[in-house]
Amino acid sequence: MSLPRPGDDPQPGGRSARVALPFQSLGVIVVGMSLAVWWPAFTLGAWGEIFFDTLLQVWAAATAAFVVVVLVPAARRRIGWLAVTLLLPTAWLVLTIAISDETGNVWVALGTLAGVLLIILGIPWMIWVLARIVWPDINEQVPLRGKVLVLGTVLLIVAASYTLGLNQARFLTCEDFAISGNSEPPGCVHQADLPG
């Protein structure tokens, strides 16, 4: 007879069912956040900007999350006033539309900076809020070191993706970008120009 393992939940008939441990669920959140932030960070490194489709995806997801929090009473109680932060992409979009390119470089630069911060900080925050909706006890079940681990991992992925974008010419060619449906970033190398 084997001893029960952590995470095993005995069932009738002597069988054991696996129960997800908090850090296993936290791993799913880390992977989700990392998948969401790598491309914007890479494009910022490779092209020097974050593409509009990424910005609008964040706006759509954050707005949908806000509607869920507002309409689901249990989610509204858990998230509270922090749900207002999900409206930041909408505020950025309204400001971007309101500020014309003719108002001056300072306002355009501030709008661009706000868009970058929105993506880099907004995506992980939005995923965390959604995680709190589907996993209500996350704040109580995950210790501070687990939350720091999530933040550190996501920041590492952002920094690595940005660095890869800056150095894309070392491991990608212009043709790699073209065949994937992307424009060629500045400084990319054509296959024909590679040695050997």
Image (cartoon, rainbow, N blue to C red):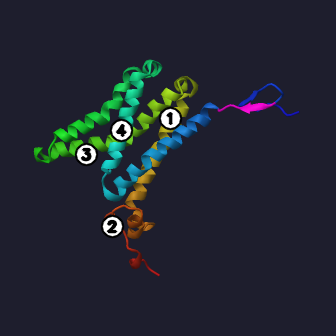
Q: How far apart are marks 1 and 3 (CA)?
A: 28 Å
* Left or right side of 113 for 54: right
Q: Name which quarter of the figure residue 186 lies in.
A: bottom left
Q: How far apart are marks 1 and 2 (CA)?
A: 36 Å
Q: Element under label 3?
A: helix
Residue 19 is covered by the magenta coloring: yes
User: What's the residue type where badge 3 is placed?
Assistant: Thr
Tag 1 residue: 148
Above or below residue 58? Residue 68 is: above
- Local crowd at mark 3 within 10 Å, few (<14), some, or many (≥20)? some
* Left or right side of 96 for 11: right
Residue at figure coordinates x 48%, y 47% from the top left: 35
Residue 133 picture location, percent across and down:
48, 27
Q: Indicate which disc, 1 or 2, sits on the residue closer to the N terminus.
A: 1
* Left or right side of 183 for 145: right
Residue 32 picture location, percent across and down:
50, 42
Q: Indicate which disc, 1 or 4, sits on the residue closer to the N terminus.
A: 4
- The quarter in which the N terminus is drawn is top right
Per the rendered image, the range of residues in magenta is 15-20
Tag 3 residue: 112
Q: Where residue 187 is drawn, which disc sits there?
A: 2
